[in-house]
Image (spheres, rainbow, N blue to C red):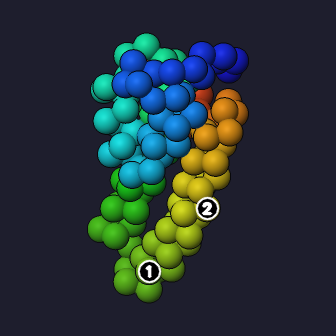
Amino acid sequence: MDIKEKGTTSLGLSGNVAALLSYLGGFVTGGIFLLLEKENKYVRFHAMQSVVVFGGLFIINLAIGLILPFGVKNLLSTLIGFLSVVLWVVLMVKGYQGEDFKVPVAGDVAEKHI
């Protein structure tokens, strides 16, 4: 992906700030920016990637909670939570720095649907 349209958004924010904010609240803020930003493809990509990554992690964590026994559930949920926080910080930093950073698989899905 080579999206050079990082300038300002239709919301009046700079593209890198909007990309950071699209990750701030996980899939919720990603969805909000996806609905509100109609022009800036850089922001739309990061918003869609936020929805795919953190929505997927939410669904996986929910399924683990419903299916697995207590001990295994706690271990996996803790691991997923830790990895989610690390990924969350990395994605916010990369979005703010203006990098076209794609999470494997999720980034490809996001790129196809912006």
- In this picture, is 64 found above or below 35? below
| Residue kind at label 2, given as amino acid type | Val
Query: Residue 16 at x, y = what percent?
Result: 57, 34
| Residue annotated with mark 1 | 74
User: Helix, strand or loop at disc 2?
Assistant: helix
Name the quadrant of the N terminus.
top right
| Residue annotated with mark 2 | 86
- In this picture, is 60 found above or below 22? below
Residue 7 is drawn in which quadrant? Answer: top right
Between 51 and 64, which is closer to the camera in this rendering? Answer: 51
Q: Which mark is residue 26?
A: none
The residue depicted at 40 percent of the width and 62 percent of the height is 61
Asked whether residue 46 is in view, the answer is: no
Marks 2 and 1, how far apart in space? 18 Å
| Residue kind at label 1, given as amino acid type | Asn
The residue depicted at 30 percent of the width and 26 percent of the height is 35
Residue 28 is drawn in which quadrant? Answer: top left
Between 83 and 62, which is closer to the camera in this rendering? Answer: 83
The residue depicted at 61 percent of the width and 61 percent of the height is 86
Label 1, residues with CA under 10 Å away: few <14, some 14-19, many ≥20:
some
